[in-house]
Image (cartoon, grey):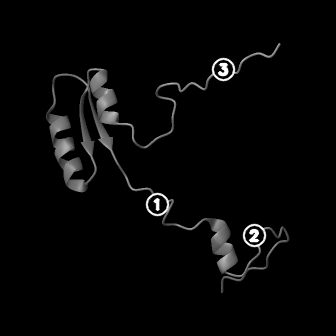
Amino acid sequence: MAVPARPARSVPGRELSSRRSGQAIAEAYGFKAWTAKTGGELDAALAEAFAWKDGPCFIDIHVESIADRVPPVYSWLTKRGANPLDLRPEAKSYI
């Protein structure tokens, strides 16, 4: 007799996603929280956070990822004409 497959389950909070709101999570734990996506928002959030005296606080700071803008090392080497998979030492001159 075959055993029926278990349905796939999602465990809350275990997904890797940039859509999570750190502010909402902090507020759910009773923290005072802010979200900062720009320099101006960060300045305002920091001023309010330092003035906050009624308990813990949290600032959810969104930063830009440079992963999409900076090419990986492999492509740097191939554009330079080097073979990244070649394990032989390469003679270098810095003069």
Q: Position of residue 79 (x, y in %)?
A: 65, 79
Indicate the amino acid at tag 3.
Answer: Arg
> Which quadrant would residue 7 be assigned to in this image?
top right
> Is residue 66 positioned above or below 11 on the image?
below
> Is residue 76 positioned above or below 41 on the image?
below
Foreground pick, 83 / 20: 20
Indicate the amino acid at tag 1.
Answer: Ile
Q: Position of residue 60 (x, y in %)?
A: 32, 40
In the picture provided, is 82 more to the left or to the right than 44? right
Q: Would you name the residue on which mark 1 appears?
A: 66
Indicate the amino acid at tag 2.
Answer: Pro
Residue at image point 64% right, 67% down? 73
Residue at image point 31% right, 21% down? 29
Tell me the SS state at disc 2: loop
Q: Would you name the residue on which mark 3 appears?
A: 6
> Which quadrant would residue 76 be assigned to in this image?
bottom right
Residue at image point 48% right, 66% down? 69
Marks 2 and 1, the one that precedes in the sequence: 1
Q: Would you name the residue on which mark 2 appears?
A: 84
Q: How many marks?
A: 3
- CA–CA distance between discs 2 and 1? 22 Å
Q: Position of residue 55 (x, y in %)?
A: 21, 22
